């Protein structure tokens, strides 16, 4: 058997692939499993989106390549959205690049900008792709601890000088996955200034900016004056418009970075399917009433989960954004993994242990709101009482 490339030894199987296998094992034993682990919306996209996709699929001339950099209409739709939403002006040709979901863009960013020996500054706990991309590129991920006492914001001053000397990328993600924390624009201003001072490319992953509650309005790093000099932002329609399976997102900001990643992508893929691009345009320009209704469903689920967890004595804040709840484990359990396994085996509930996102996630679990409201009610009944599956 031919041995895998050495770079494969640097990474483990993706954490959610392991969770899927574990819950399927339990299901095979006859357990009614309620899955609250993966952040995949259970609700459908709006009718405008579906209709645009169907119309494109029925069109005989829309099954060819979608273009390496997407269609002009696609790029303009995202630029116009950022203008409306954040009052940010983006050049559709030079500062907007379509992605097959932001996750692939995160990995492409690592290969485009990290050399062996370089450092990527990554949040811990954080989305595993930030670390995985750096490792596959032969670089070293350096964890920036996100701690409750700091509002889940990293302490830039705690990064050692020798690490800063090698740092090429910094990953930030607010509203945050998994902690659900939000960051004020003043924090993003400080991050831009810090990265400019140390010649670090700031990569802000912002897929949850429209999954917000209680009147909160999430910012964009590109709102910071001069941010385009040193920053880019990733956006996605996966969570905000229930389009996770369509794999559509964008990279925006610094024109040179967009061009460089675009060059890599022309060699790696052929751009999004035209039908998906037209669905994305419909998502950004069509009626948004359905999306507000979907977000209200998430708010109801959030309140159910927070209420149930607090009844168990868990330390938990009601999130202002994202489609998750980040909760401390209850008394009687030593680790996140121990409580997660207890919930799976004894309650038929799958949650993600905090350590799946880094060592500073210990003591917490992430609960996804991407399950039907009735199933979430069932899960809370099982958690808070003697109810089993």
Image (cartoon, rainbow, N blue to C red):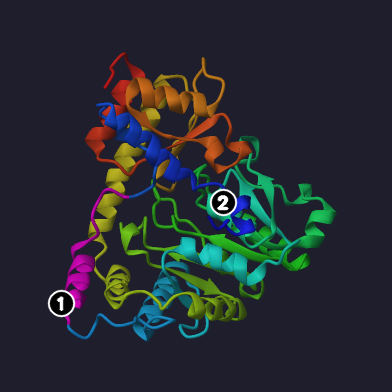
The magenta region covers 41-59
Residue 92's spot in the image, x, y percent?
Answer: 46, 83
The residue under the point 34% across, 83% down is 73
Q: Which residue is mark 2?
A: 183
Residue 49 is one of the magenta-drawn residues: yes
How far apart marks 1 and 2 lie (CA) works out to: 43 Å
Disc 2, SS: loop
Q: Is the residue marked by circle 1 packed among few (<14), some (14-19), or many (20+) residues within 10 Å?
A: few
Q: From the viewer's side, name the closer residue of 337 and 40.
A: 337
Disc 1 + disc 2, Cβ < 8 Å: no
Residue 114, above or below 337: below
* Image: 334 above or below 156: above
In the image, is 116 to the left or to the right of 227?
A: right
User: Where is residue 125 drawn, in percent x and y?
Assistant: 58, 43
2 vs 256, nearest the viewer: 2
Q: Earlier in the sequence, mark 1 or mark 2?
A: 1
Local SS, label 1 = helix
Residue at x 65%, y 61% (from the top left corner): 189
Q: Does the stretch in magenta take in 387?
A: no
Most frequent secondary structure within the magenta stretch: helix
Residue hosting label 1: 58
Vertical arrangement, residue 28 with respect to residue 282, above or below? above
Residue 225 visible, this angle:
no
């Amino acid at each position: 058997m031919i041995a895998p490339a050495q770079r494969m030894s640097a990474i483990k199987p993706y954490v959610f692939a392991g969770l899927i296998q574990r819950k399927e094992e339990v299901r095979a034993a006859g357990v009614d499993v309620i899955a609250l682990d993966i952040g995949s919306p259970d609700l459908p996209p709006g009718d405008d989106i579906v209709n645009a996709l169907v119309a494109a699929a029925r069109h005989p001339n829309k099954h060819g390549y979608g273009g390496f950099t997407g269609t002009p209409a696609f790029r303009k739709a995202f630029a116009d959205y950022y203008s409306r939403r954040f009052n940010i002006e983006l050049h559709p040709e030079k500062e907007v690049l379509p992605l097959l979901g932001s996750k692939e863009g995160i990995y492409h960013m690592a290969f485009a900008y990290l050399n062996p020996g370089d450092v990527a500054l990554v949040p811990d706990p954080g989305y595993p792709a930030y670390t995985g991309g750096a490792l596959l590129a032969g670089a070293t991920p350096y964890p920036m601890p996100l701690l409750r006492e700091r509002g889940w914001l990293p302490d830039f001053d705690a990064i050692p000088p020798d690490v800063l000397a090698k740092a090429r990328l910094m990953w930030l993600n607010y509203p945050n996955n998994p902690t659900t924390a939000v960051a004020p624009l003043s924090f993003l201003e400080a991050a831009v200034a810090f990265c400019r001072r140390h010649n670090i490319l700031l990569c802000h992953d912002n897929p949850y900016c429209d999954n917000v509650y209680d009147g909160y309005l999430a910012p964009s790093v590109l709102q910071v004056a001069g941010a385009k000099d040193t920053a880019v932002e990733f956006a996605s329609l996966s969570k905000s418009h229930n389009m996770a399976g369509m794999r559509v997102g964008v990279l925006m900001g610094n024109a040179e970075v967009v061009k460089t990643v675009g060059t890599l992508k022309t060699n790696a893929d052929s751009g999004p399917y035209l039908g998906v691009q037209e669905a994305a345009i419909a998502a950004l320009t069509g009626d948004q009433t359905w999306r507000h209704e979907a977000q209200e469903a998430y708010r109801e689920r959030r309140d159910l989960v927070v209420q149930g967890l607090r009844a168990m004595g868990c330390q938990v804040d009601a999130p202002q954004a994202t489609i998750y709840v980040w909760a401390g484990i209850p008394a009687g359990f030593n680790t996140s993994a121990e409580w997660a396994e207890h919930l799976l085996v004894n309650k038929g509930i799958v949650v993600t242990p905090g350590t799946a996102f880094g060592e500073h996630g210990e003591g917490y679990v992430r609960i996804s709101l991407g399950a039907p409201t009735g199933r979430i009610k069932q899960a809370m009944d099982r958690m808070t009482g003697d109810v089993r599956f």
